[in-house]
Image: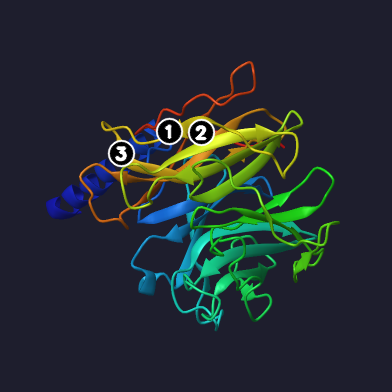
């Protein structure tokens, strides 16, 4: 073997050794958790894996598809490209936003907003994709929007699908400073009226702008939302607690916001709960320091902690992210 070839193999060996040592040193997720401009992330657990479904952060006309990411340990993430796009959803032309996924009877449903409608004459609103796998591909479930009108002043965007403790599914949604909750039909093809005959109940708390999220802990309903402007430094997340998914929700305070030493514009979040544990993580987007383009947003993860009274401690946003955490089977 000539000297050049020996040097070549030695170089390869050194590179592989360096990569292996670097891999061994990876103990936290780092923030952002994966490369690329992504926002409005929803975190979930499907089949003993963590999943994140974000918005592709770009000008509206370029937001014509969605990617997803999966992980077994919160640190190493696998990208699932174009799980749904406008070639499948014929009525969607732009602004595909804020996916919300849920599993029901072996099927996976992906709720999304599209077209950024400004009035009831425009085509668009909230639609649904369906797939046999969480990573898609998703097909247009209805062939039209599930919701295509403005009710109670709420633009039909930023939908979150919530399963109550009694098994009832609700969709909580709304932009323009208004939030509605609707009861979903069992097959997700429409809505069920409430006992008083209404369909759209407004549950808007103080300072609400967009990005609703709800969960149950110790029998209490926690409602969270984004405040401020999505493109600016004052974007943040606040919350309230009630005894019902209908509130009333009295604002308690802000738990996520920018840190001038770390990142700006932290908001539009979701939570991941480790199955079987009272252990929580917040998934959110923020803008790296020095970035002034409103669409230059990245997806991050940090710990979420409750105090003894059940209130949420303010989140410390970090560059490190979180440690490896596999789901115990």
- Residue 47 located left or right of residue 28: right
> Which is nearer the eye, 176 or 72?
176
Mark closer to the chain start, 3 or 1: 1
Residue at disc 3, secondary structure: strand
Residue occupying the point 63% across, 60% down:
134
> Are circles 1 and 2 on residues that touch, CB within 8 Å?
yes
Question: Which residue is located at x 31 percent, y 46 percent?
Answer: 287
Is residue 134 found left or right of 39 in the rendered image? right
Q: Is tag 1's residue or tag 2's residue first in the polypeptide sequence?
A: 1
Separation of residues labelled 1 and 2 (CA atoms): 6 Å
Q: Considering only order in the chain, which callout, 3 or 2, is on the residue closer to the N terminus?
A: 3
* Secondary structure category for the residue under label 2: loop
Disc 1 target residue: 28
Residue wearing tag 3: 263
Q: Are marks 3 and 1 in contact (CB under 8 Å)?
A: no
The secondary element bearing badge 1 is classed as loop
Spot occupied by residue 261 in the image (x, y as percentages of width and height): 26, 31
Q: Say which residue label 2 marks.
A: 324
Q: How many marks?
A: 3
Task: Name the image quarter holding residue 15.
Answer: top left
Residue 183 point in image, percent of width and height:
76, 58
Residue 56 appears in which quarter of the rendering?
Answer: bottom left
Q: Residue at x 46, y 29 (%)?
A: 315
Residue 239 quadrant: top right
């Amino acid at each position: 073997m000539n000297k050049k070839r020996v040097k070549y193999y030695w170089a390869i060996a050194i590179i592989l050794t360096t990569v292996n040592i670097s891999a061994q040193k990876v103990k936290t997720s780092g923030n952002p958790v994966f490369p690329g401009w992504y926002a409005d992330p929803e975190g979930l657990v499907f089949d003993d894996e963590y999943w994140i479904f974000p918005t592709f952060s770009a000008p509206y006309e370029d937001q014509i598809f969605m990617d997803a990411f999966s992980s077994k340990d919160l640190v190493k993430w696998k990208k699932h490209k174009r799980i749904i796009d406008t070639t499948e959803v014929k009525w969607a032309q732009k602004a595909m936003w804020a996916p919300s996924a849920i599993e029901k009877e072996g099927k996976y449903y992906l709720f999304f907003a599209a077209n950024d409608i400004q009035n009831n004459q425009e085509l668009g609103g909230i639609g649904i994709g369906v797939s046999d796998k969480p990573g898609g591909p998703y097909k247009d479930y209805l062939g039209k929007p599930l919701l295509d009108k403005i009710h109670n002043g709420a633009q039909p965007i930023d939908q979150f699908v919530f399963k109550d403790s009694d098994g009832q599914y609700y969709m909580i949604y709304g932009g323009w400073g208004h939030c509605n909750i609707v009861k979903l039909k069992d097959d997700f093809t429409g809505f069920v009226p409430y006992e008083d005959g209404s369909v759209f109940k407004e549950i808007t708390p103080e300072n609400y702008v967009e990005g609703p999220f709800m969960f149950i802990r110790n029998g209490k309903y926690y409602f969270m939302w984004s405040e401020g402007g999505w493109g600016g430094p004052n974007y943040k997340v606040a919350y309230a607690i009630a005894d019902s998914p209908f509130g009333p929700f009295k604002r308690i305070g802000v738990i996520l916001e920018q840190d001038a030493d770390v990142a700006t514009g932290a908001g539009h979040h979701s939570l991941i709960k480790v199955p079987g544990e009272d252990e929580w993580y917040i998934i959110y987007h923020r803008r790296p320091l020095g970035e002034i383009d409103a669409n230059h947003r990245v997806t991050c993860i940090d710990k979420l902690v409750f105090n003894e009274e059940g209130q949420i401690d303010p989140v410390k946003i970090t560059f490190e992210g979180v440690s490896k955490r596999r789901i115990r089977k």
